[in-house]
Amino acid sequence: MGKLIFIFLFISSYCTAGVPLWKQEDKQEHLLAGALISQTTYIYTLKITDSKNQAFIWSLVTPLLLGTLKEVYDSYQPNKKFDIQDLGVTMLGATIVIPLDLFSTKKTKKQVHLSE
C-alpha cells in the first residue's frame, strides 16, 4: 500500500505545461473514469464468477481497453492526439480502487441452496 501511495504522489506531482496533473480537469476526469470502470468491473465480475483473481484481472483490463479506445478515438479528432498521460492517469485511477478484500485471507462462505 505504501508503494501505491508513493506512485500516486510521484505521478500527481508531474507537471504538464507547468500545471500539476491533479489540477488538470481532463486528468481528474480520467482518474475518476478509471476508478469507476475498475470498481464496477470488479464488483460485476466477482458476482458472476465468484473469483477474486478473475475480478482483479478484468478490473485492470477493462479500463485499459476502454482508455486505449478513447485515446484512439481522440487521435482522429481535429487538433487532438493519442495522449499516453491520459491513459496512464486512467490506469492510476483503476489501481487506486482495487478492493482491499482482494488481499484479505478470510474465506467467504458459499451459499448453499437447499432443494425442497
Image (cartoon, helix red, strand yellow):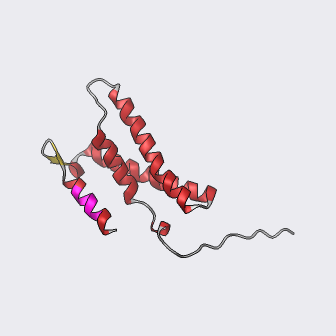
Quarter containing the N terminus: bottom left
Figure check: 116 above or below 98: below
- Which residue is more in the foreground, 16 or 1? 1
In the image, taking residue 16 as reference, residue 71 lies left or right, namely: right
Q: Is residue 34 magenta?
A: no
Give the extent of the magenta segment.
5-10
Question: For residue 83, which quarter of the picture?
Answer: top left
- Which residue is more in the foreground, 95 or 22? 95
Figure check: 63 above or below 109: above
Residue at 61 percent of width and 61 percent of height: 50
The answer to whether residue 25 is visible is: yes
Residue at 40 percent of width and 41 percent of height: 67
Figure check: 107 above or below 77: below
Point out residue 59 in the picture as x, y percentages from the top left corner. 48, 53
Figure check: 101 above or below 38: below
Quarter containing the C terminus: bottom right
